[in-house]
Amino acid sequence: MAEMNFGGVVEQVATRDEFPLEKAREVLKNETIAVIGYGVQGPGQALNLRDNGFNVIIGQRKGGKTWEKAIADGWVPGETLFDIEEAAEKGTIIQYLLSDAAQIEVWPRLKPYLTAGKALYFSHGFGITYKERTGIIPPADVDVILVAPKGSGTSLRRMFLEGRGLNSSYAIFQDATGRAKERVIALGIGVGSGYLFETDFKREVYSDLTGERGTLMGAIQGILLAQYEVLRENGHSPSEAFNETVEELTQSLMPLFAEKGMDWMYANCSTTAQRGALDWMGPFHDASKPVFEKLYKEVACGNEAQRSIDTNSKPDYREKLEEELKALRESEMWRTGAVVRKLRPENN
Ligand SMILES: NC(=O)c1ccc[n+]([C@@H]2O[C@H](COP(=O)([O-])OP(=O)(O)OC[C@H]3O[C@@H](n4cnc5c(N)ncnc54)[C@H](O)[C@@H]3O)[C@@H](O)[C@H]2O)c1
Ligand SMILES: CC(C)(O)[C@@H](O)C(=O)O
Ligand SMILES: [Mg+2]
Ligand SMILES: [Mg+2]
């Protein structure tokens, strides 16, 4: 573990320097990693683990779309691809990567296979933290661990293939074997993380639910749309409104502040822009902070979890989500985006 100073606060971080891939392979050499679920995180983690030389099998509902996807990715029925129960029986580490709602439904069928000494692995603190709502209460004689990649499973895989990797947080809820720590760090390195930030299940789920509802997904669409609408209502064309709201952000300015911070991005814009941004960041902060405070409270009291469980447990939840995504896709702003993306010079 390395002690690292983050803006004046010291935290523990696991690194590849002290825990290289060879060590991870040694730690897990006698384990069978059963990845249950092949949606978004399942393929990302399973393929990275396989490419990194670990012994991985997949557990999936037979016959569905993702069963076919697993076969297309090279998993072989009866050898490395099984139904959920069979994979859970064979696995010594069970990576529970069904959707959070499906984890509740499948739990009674999975639990009998969690025999002494196995490890139950999550990529979210949801099931354990909200156990009164999920009913997910693991047996006392298994390790219960978490590696939560800080990004989409699609990015986890893409960045691995680019030779980069995506960092994760990790946590231990239950150490029954005395090996929980080496198991969890080895798995984190195995799925392609370079650094692993220490957390616990509750802090992981509270921060993750806040982040995705907030700046990462919910707030970003809300604020982009608000500006786009104001520009359109004041007579600006769709392309002008989109370029000034989204395209410049993602293509020009976001990469700059990702690389060297917000002040550096500001410093690479005009003094006119800097003056205005420095003056207006305060009002935007003050307007949005109460919304973030309300959001955090809704997460911490369990309302957000319950809403997600209730809606995503319905048989037609996928169709309903797709309807809402279709409405986003077909909104003027994102139809404009589809055209603007094609006009990126590199696409010509
Ligand atoms: N999506 C991400 O990139 C991401 C990122 C970090 C953490 N996570 C966490 O990882 C876990 C998996 O998330 P995901 O987004 O990959 O899940 P997902 O929604 O893509 O679903 C995963 C799998 O669950 C299967 N499934 C759904 N309902 C089922 C049911 N009733 N019975 C059997 N199988 C069923 C699906 O077919 C799919 O193969 C969750 O805990 C999530 O919070 C996800
Ligand atoms: C990729 C995210 C948003 O970070 C993840 O938390 C999820 O739930 O998909
Ligand atoms: Mg999440
Ligand atoms: Mg997340």
Image (cartoon, grey):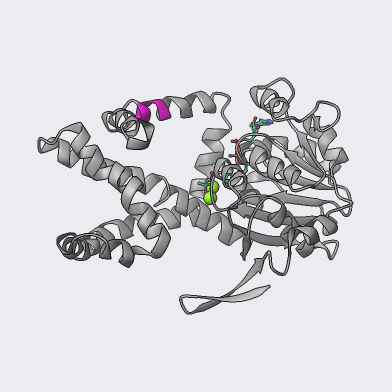
Residue 294's quadrant in the figure?
bottom left
Q: Is the magenta stretch mostly helix, strand or loop?
A: helix
- Using the image, determine if residue 69 lies above or below residue 279: above
Q: How far across and how far down the image is residue 290, in percent?
A: 32, 59
Q: In which quarter of the image is the C terminus?
A: top left
Residue 279's quadrant in the figure?
bottom left
Residue at x 16%, y 36% (from the top left corner): 232
Which segment did they paint magenta? 325-329
Q: How far across and how far down the image is residue 203, in percent?
A: 56, 61
Of residue 283 and residue 128, the one placed in the foreground of this image is 283
Figure quadrant, ligand 1? top right
Residue 137 in view (yes/no): no
Residue at x 59%, y 59% (from the top left corner): 202
Residue at x 31%, y 61% (from the top left corner): 265
The residue at the far top in this view is 63
- Using the image, determine if residue 120 lies above or below residue 61: below
Left or right, 206 with reference to 45: left
The residue at the far left in this view is 235
Left or right, 99 with reference to 249: right
Residue 262 in view (yes/no): yes
Of residue 300 and residue 52, the one placed in the foreground of this image is 52
Residue 334's quadrant in the figure?
top left
Q: How far across and how far down the image is residue 259, in percent?
A: 42, 60
